[in-house]
Amino acid sequence: MYVYKMVQVPPNVEVDAKKHKGNEAAAYLQSVVNTHAEDGWEFYRVDTIGVAVKPGCFDALFGKKTELSSYYVISFRRQS
């Protein structure tokens, strides 16, 4: 039996152009995973979750459309 922990991470990693090496996303993910591994959490997977935000009544009257966003979630697990 496992218990799970989900951690939402930003969709983009910002880097200074002078320091850009091409491996920033992997380094960021590795840092997050290692931080949680120190607390006993095992990396399980990364998922993309889409969220649709519908406009309120007032905004809809003025033609505002549903906004779609993608969020990234890292899943960890450990035995309970």
Image (tube, rainbow, N blue to C red):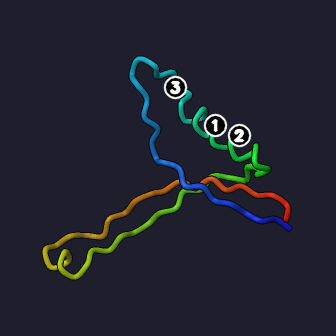
* Image quadrant assignment for residue 4: bottom right
Q: Estimate how packed mark 1 is, as few (under 14), some (14 to 19) or many (20 or more) residues with alpha carbons within 10 Å.
A: few
- The residue furthest front is 39
Residue neighbourhood size for the residue with mark 3, other residues' Cα within 10 Å, grouped as few (<14), some (14–19), many (≥20):
few
From the top left corner, tell me how far across and down residue 17 is, in percent.
Answer: 39, 22
- Which percent across, then down, holds residue 26? 60, 34
Residue on which disc 3 sits? 22
Residue under the point 42% across and 34% down:
14
- Name which residue type carries label 2: Asn
> Disc 2 designates what residue?
34
Q: Residue at x 45, y 42 (%)?
A: 12
Along the line of sight, which residue is nearer the eye, 9 or 67?
A: 9
Q: Position of residue 57 (x, y in %)?
A: 22, 82
Please state if 45 lies on the left or on the right of 49 as rendered.
Answer: right
Which of marks 3 and 2 precedes in the sequence? Answer: 3
Judged by depth in the image, the label closer to the viewer, 2 or 3, is 2
Q: Residue furthest bottom?
A: 57
Q: Which residue sits at x=70%, y=47%? A: 36
| Label 2 packing within 10 angstroms: few (<14), some (14-19), many (20+) | some
Q: Is residue 80 above or below residue 55?
A: above
What x and y, as percent, mark residue 37? 75, 45
Contact (Cβ within 8 Å) of mark 2 with mark 1: yes
Q: Where does label 1 land, which residue?
A: 31
Depth order, front residue of 29/70: 29
Using residue 34 as the reference point, say whether residue 17 is left or right of it.
Answer: left
Q: Earlier in the sequence, mark 3 or mark 1?
A: 3
Q: Is residue 3 above or below residue 47?
A: below
Tell me whether circle 3 and circle 1 mark residues in contact (CB < 8 Å). Answer: no
Mark 1: secondary structure = helix
Q: Quadrant of the N terminus?
A: bottom right
Residue type highlighted by circle 3: Gly
Disc 2 to disc 1, how far (Cα)? 5 Å
